[in-house]
Image: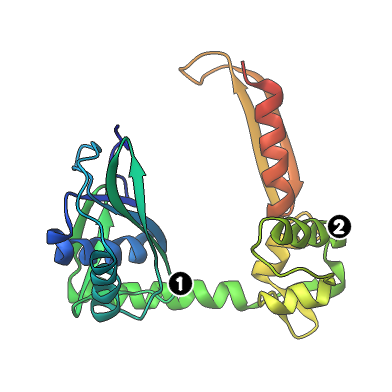
């Protein structure tokens, strides 16, 4: 069985003997995308070769992540069995960039991990600080201008898939829980995710050919990000051939 190609968020290692290289890949993927998956027991071309998996080997992976990656992350590590072959899956995420592996910093480029220069690291800190400030900065939209139906749909789905505990939630509780308010206003993240002010524009189109020069249909939708995800999916399902 083949798991496909390595990408900027997916890395394959043949065995846990490549632990040091795996930690570098985890840090570089976190620095570029904040989320990723790594497999032990899979060749670089995606073929599953398998490896011995035991409680000890799973602990070794967990210990290496704990000792190598800074700031600390808490990955999901599990044994997977496909076609009778055992291998290890590591799912990880984090939003406290930049992350280091054994004190060094890396950045993902295609399917490779490249060590960053001191100047690049300095620029990374500056750009990351700016990005965080934008998300948390107050918008001009009042917290009362939240799309209540959208927020309700969000928490109901989150509860149904086990990402939130059972209960009935209100808009103020959800907004505060996820840090989407700043005083009496939604912050920028809150407005774009759940605002009723239609803050985001989505362009959807059908091309006549693969050359993408002639349109058979084009529509513009304005809404918040949460609703536009559903709108985009509906448009694709309606028009897919």
Kindly identify which numbered label has been placed on residue 95: 1
Asked where in the image residue 141 lies, by quadrant, the reply is bottom right
On the image, the x and y values in percent for residue 40 come to: 24, 53
Of 85 and 37, the residue lying toward us? 85
- The residue that mark 2 highlights is 149
* Upstream in sequence: badge 2 or badge 1: 1
Residue extending farthest to the left is 17
Please report the residue visible at 15 percent of the width from the left and 67 percent of the height from the top: 20
Q: Position of residue 50 (x, y in %)?
A: 22, 45
- Check the picture and name the quadrant holding the C terminus: top right
Which of the pair 93/126 is nearer the observer?
93
Residue located at (20% from left, 58% from top): 113
Q: Residues within 10 Å of mark 2 (few under 14, many from 20)?
A: few
- Asked which secondary structure carries label 2, the reply is helix
Image vertical order of residue 235 relative to residue 197, above or below:
above
Relative depth, front residue between 213 and 227? 227
Tell me which residue sits at (51%, 75%) in the image: 132
Structural distance between the alpha carbons of marks 2 and 1: 28 Å
Q: Residue furthest bottom?
A: 183
Q: Is residue 136 left or right of residue 196?
A: left
């Amino acid at each position: 069985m083949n798991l496909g190609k390595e990408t900027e968020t997916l890395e394959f290692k043949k065995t846990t003997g490549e632990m040091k290289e795996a930690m570098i890949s985890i840090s570089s993927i976190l620095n570029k995308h904040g989320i990723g998956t790594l497999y032990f027991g899979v060749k670089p071309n995606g073929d599953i070769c398998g490896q011995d998996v035991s409680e000890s080997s799973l602990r070794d992976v967990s210990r290496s992540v704990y000792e190598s990656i800074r700031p600390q992350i808490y990955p999901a590590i599990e044994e997977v069995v496909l076609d009778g072959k055992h291998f290890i899956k590591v799912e990880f995420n984090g939003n406290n960039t930049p992350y280091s592996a054994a004190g060094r910093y890396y950045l993902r480029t295609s399917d490779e991990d490249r060590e960053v220069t001191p100047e690049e690291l300095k620029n990374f800190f500056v750009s990351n600080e700016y990005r965080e400030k934008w998300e948390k900065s107050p918008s001009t939209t009042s917290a009362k201008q939240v799309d209540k139906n959208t927020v309700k749909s969000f928490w109901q789905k989150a509860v149904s898939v086990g990402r939130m505990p059972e209960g009935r939630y209100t808009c103020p509780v959800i907004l505060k829980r996820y840090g989407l308010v700043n005083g009496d206003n939604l912050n920028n993240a809150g407005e774009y995710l759940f605002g009723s002010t239609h803050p985001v524009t989505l362009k959807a189109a059908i091309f006549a050919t693969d050359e993408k020069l002639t349109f058979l249909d084009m529509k513009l939708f304005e809404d918040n990000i949460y609703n536009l995800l559903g709108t985009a999916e509906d448009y694709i399902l309606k028009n897919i051939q």
